[in-house]
Image: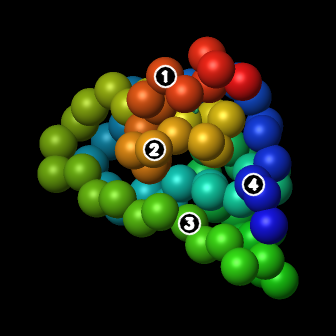
Amino acid sequence: MEPECPQKSPYVIDVEPGTYAWCRCGKSGTQPYCDGSHAGTNISPEVVKFEEKRTVAWCGCKRTKNPPYCDGTHSLL
Ligand code: FES
């Protein structure tokens, strides 16, 4: 299944240290994070852990080649 495309730009968010599950299927209602909506698909979230506070550009188009981060691919859509 092709992922859905919630938006053709990244979600730029200041995140606290912790573990995050980036939605890969595009169906989550809590973008850019997984809410379990991938159930029944063959897609699962990308889980990343940050030790320090940082600003993350989460891919919103779900077509990045460097998940979960925006790599500019959205500009080709
Ligand atoms: S939002 Fe997907 S590559 Fe930028």
**Label 4, label 2: how far apart the Cα atoms are:** 13 Å
> Quick one: which residue is furthest to the front in this view?
76
Q: Which residue is mark 3?
A: 45
* Residue 48 image position (x, y, % from top left): 35, 59
Residue 19 percent coordinates (x, y) = 36, 61
Q: Are marks 2 and 1 in contact (CB under 8 Å)?
A: no
Quadrant holding ligand 1?
Answer: top right
Circle 1 residue: 72
- Label whose residue precedes the other's in the sequence (4 or 3): 4
Q: Mark 4 or 3, which is nearer the eye?
A: 4
Q: Is residue 50 above or below residue 70?
A: below
Q: Amino acid at mark 1?
A: Gly
Q: Which residue is mark 4?
A: 3
Marks 2 and 3, how far apart at CA: 14 Å
How far apart marks 4 and 3 lie (CA) works out to 11 Å
Task: Identify the secondary structure beneath mark 4.
Answer: loop
